[in-house]
Structure formats: structure tokens, C-alpha cells
Image: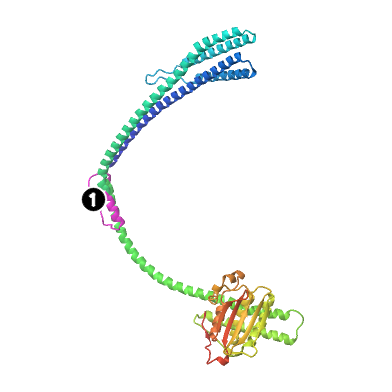
Amino acid sequence: MLLVRLALVIAVSFCFVVILGLALYAGSREVEWYVDSGQMAYEAFDRYESLAQDAYRHFKQRMDLLLVDNEATQADVESSGRRLRETIKRLKSASAAQPVAAERRGEAPHDQRSEIERVNRLTAILESAMTRFDEVERLRQDGKREAALLLLSKVLEENIDREFEPLIDAAINAEHERALIARERLRSLLDLFRWISVAAASIAALFSITAGVLLFRSIKGPIEALMRGTDEIAEGNFTHRIAVSGHGEFRYLAKHFNQMARRLELQQEKLREARAVLEQKVAERTLELGRVNRELQSLDHARRQFFADISHELRTPLTVIRGEAEITLRGKEKSAEEYKEALGRILELSMQLGMVVNDLLFLARSETASLQFDWDDIELSDLVAHAVEDMRSLAHEKSISVRFAGPGSPLRVRGDKQRLRQVLFILLDNSCRYSNPGTAIDIALRGDGREALLSISDQGIGVPAQDLEVIFDRYYRSTKARRSTEDGTGLGLPVAKGIVHAHGGRIAASVNSDGPGTTFTLALPTIEAETGDIVGIIAPGA
């Protein structure tokens, strides 16, 4: 039923639109014809006006030539004659090209043949007048002025006043009247269109309102029922059913909607059961995956830390061993004592390297493992002097001079000789690595009665002031350090800090006040200032 009503409304609307379109099309043709007719009348009016102006201008100049004979007047006459002939030619062409207008609504058509005959008469009159003006000119040139004036008077009276002027006035008035008629008929047609538009709009509005109200009343109730049903289904209430009375499309929709709701209800029950089983399995797998993931992360962290520590801790001893060997083999033959001394330093470094490897392997097997220290009384000035001597080969490669100022008296500390040597290697290696070629590294060792104070000052790239507190953190490298060299893992300074703290000392870094570079200060308690034993353990990652 609803489809029939909709089809009826659409058919009526379509017929109305077609009729209105045909009426507008016919009216537009009428408007077009009246506009064209008026335009042609105004164009013809302009052509006759131009012809009259050019003709009177030429006749006046011919009269002036009779009265004043000079070259300028003769040139004006020739120019106006050419212009007049061109105007006559354009008038003939336009008259011949004008279409024959058909009769419309009882109006007499514009007679093209009358238009052409009028143009021909005007042309004949003008040509006759110009011929007689030429005769007047010959009489003037023959000296017969009186005869020339008499003929000129006849030409003006007969050709101009009696023939040309009435005919041109009649043509201008006719075209003007034609334009006025076209304009009045166009205005009347536009008024008719205006009333037709108002009437069509009123009928269309009335029909639309009536049809809309009737359709709205017939579909409002069923649509509201369907909307409530869709809202209930959207909210998860699959038990809702739509009750629509009557016949037609809405009853069909309600029936199938209720069937869909029943199927959705059954599917929802199955989904809830499947979801419960799936959630239980997902929870079990999640717990298992979490445990495995934590184990993998722990293993990966241990692996990365192990390789990072190896790469950092093995670099410096290997570099020094290579430097010792290169210096020993370079140059002239050395004595057995010198070779023995060099081999002793290499052996000492190799032992330190082996100890580092053993410690790293031990740490890799257990995150809770600790580094053990071999405590002994150490003469710190000798240890520093040997470390400086070992690092001279590394500094020599970069053209860096190393200057060492030792104390006036021995400084004895209690600690692990190899671990303290490792701290010295870390600090000296950093100074060499980040110093500019041709600069110097100043090392000073002194005692104040309670502590042994060691300072290592370079003239390198320096450490930004905001990074002084974090350079001892594990894996941290400042922006300048990363730009200066790509190697390095940020492990050296944290390891050095942990060893120093295990010896009861302290370590710090500061920016040089008298130039570029950084100064590292190391303080260790001397044996005379100790009050008890020092705990010999450094925890991993200290």
C-alpha cells in the first residue's frame, strides 16, 4: 500500500513538472523571439541614423566646397563620400541578411521585401543626389556660378527635402515603433510568466504539503515501532519484538525483523558460552606468556650486559699490551734487561686482563654475584707512576704529552692493586680518547694526612656542566662524547666509581676553569687514617 501511494505521488509530481517545463520552454521561445525582434529593430534604427548623419555631413561638405574652394575641403568631401558609400553598403547587406519573421499571436510580420525596397529607394535617391552634386561641381569649375547655385537649390529641394528626408524619417520611425512593440509584448509575456510561476509554486506547495501529511500519518507509527526495535537490539535486548498491525510493507518488515532478533538472541547465547571458554584459555596463555617473556627479557638483558662489559673492559688492557709490544719492537735492538722489563709489564697487563675476563664470566652466570678483592698494602705513588708509564704509548699515538707530578713522600693505601690499576686505566684511557692532538694531560698525586688525592686533568672536549652528575651512571655517554667517537659503552666510569667506593674513597668530575677539558679527582684513605678494615665487595652495576 505504501509503495502504491508513493508511486501515485511521484507520478503526479512528474506530470506537473513536465507540464511546467513545456510551458516554460514555449515561453522562453517567445521571449527569445521578442528579444531578437527588438534587437534587430534597434540595430536597424542605428543603421538608418548613421546613414542620415553620413548623408547630411557629405551634402554639407559639398555645399562648403561650392562656397570655399580649397584642398582641405576637397579632401573632406572625398572622405565623407567614401564613408557614405560604405554606410549604404552595410545597410544593404544587413537588410538582405535579416530573417523573415513569422506571424505570432495575430501580429503582422515584418515585410523584408518592403525593407529591401526602402533601402533601394534611399540608395537611388542618394546616388541621384550625388550625381547632381557632381554636375553642380562641373558648372562651378566652368565658371557658371549662378547656374551651379540654381542647380544646388533644386538638388536640396527635390532630392533632399522632398525625397530623402521623409523617407529616412519614415524608416527611423518605423524601426523605433517596431522596437517599442517588441518591448511591450516582452513585458506582457514576463508578467504572464510571473503569475504562472506564482500559481505553479502555490499548487506545488499545496500538493507537497497535502501529500506529505498523508504519507507522514501513514508511516509514522510503523517507523517509530521499527526505530524502537532497532534501539533495543542495539542495546543488546534481543528479546524485544515488534508488533505492527495491518498489511503491506511494514508488516513484512516487522515479521522479518522479529525473525532476525530471534536468530541474534540464539547467536548471542552461543557467543557468551564461547567467550567464557576463550577468556579462560586466554588468561592461562597470558600467564604463561608473561612468565616466558620475563625469562627472555632477563636472559636478553644479561646477554647484552655481558657483551657490553666484555667489549669495554677488554679494550683498554689490549690496547696497552699492543702499545708495549710496538714500542719494544720499534727502533734499535734493546738489551735483555729492557726486553725483560717490557715483557714484565705485558705479563702484568695480561694477568689483569685474565682477571677481568674471569670476573665478567662469573657475573654473566649470576646477576647476584660479587667481585672479590685481594686486599694488600699498596704504595700508591709507584702504582700511579707505572700506570702513567703504561699509558704513554697510547698518548704518544695521538701526539699527547703526559705530565706526572708525584708526592714528596710515599703514600700508602690499603686496597686491591689490580682493581686500582683498572681505575687508573679507565681514567687515563678516557683522557687520551677525548683529548685533542697536541695537548697535554696533567696528573698530580698528593696527600693531606688523611687521604691520597689524585687529579687527572686533560684539555679535551670537556663534559657539559649538566652532565657532571650523570656521567657515572651505567651506559650514559654525553652528547659531546658520542659526537667525538662512536666506540664506548658508558661502562668505564660506573665501574671505576664502584671500585673506588669499595675502597672507601670517592671520585668526582669537574670542568676546568682555566680552559677546555675535564678534571677527574680521586680520593682514597691512607693507611695512617684508617680506623678499620675496608669491606672488599663491589656489587654488580654499582
Image location (x, y in percent) of residue 322? 67, 78
The residue depicted at 32 percent of the width and 64 percent of the height is 273
Instruction: Residue under label 1, please give it.
Output: 243
On screen, residue 456 versus residue 95, left or right, reads right
Determine if residue 492 is in view.
no
Image location (x, y in percent) of residue 269? 30, 61
Task: Look at label 1 and name its amino acid.
Answer: Ala
Give 48 or 102, whichever is nearer the viewer. 48
User: Which colour scheme appears in the figure?
Assistant: rainbow
Residue 202 located within the stretch drawn in magenta? no
Magenta residue span: 224-249
Image location (x, y in percent) of residue 394? 67, 77
The image quadrant that residue 529 belongs to is bottom right
Residue 234 located within the stretch drawn in magenta? yes
The image quadrant that residue 174 belongs to is top left
- Residue 379, relative to residue 468: is it above or below? below
Image location (x, y in percent) of residue 523? 57, 85
On screen, residue 418 versus residue 214, left or right, reads right
Judging from the image, what secondary structure is the residue with disc 1 in?
loop
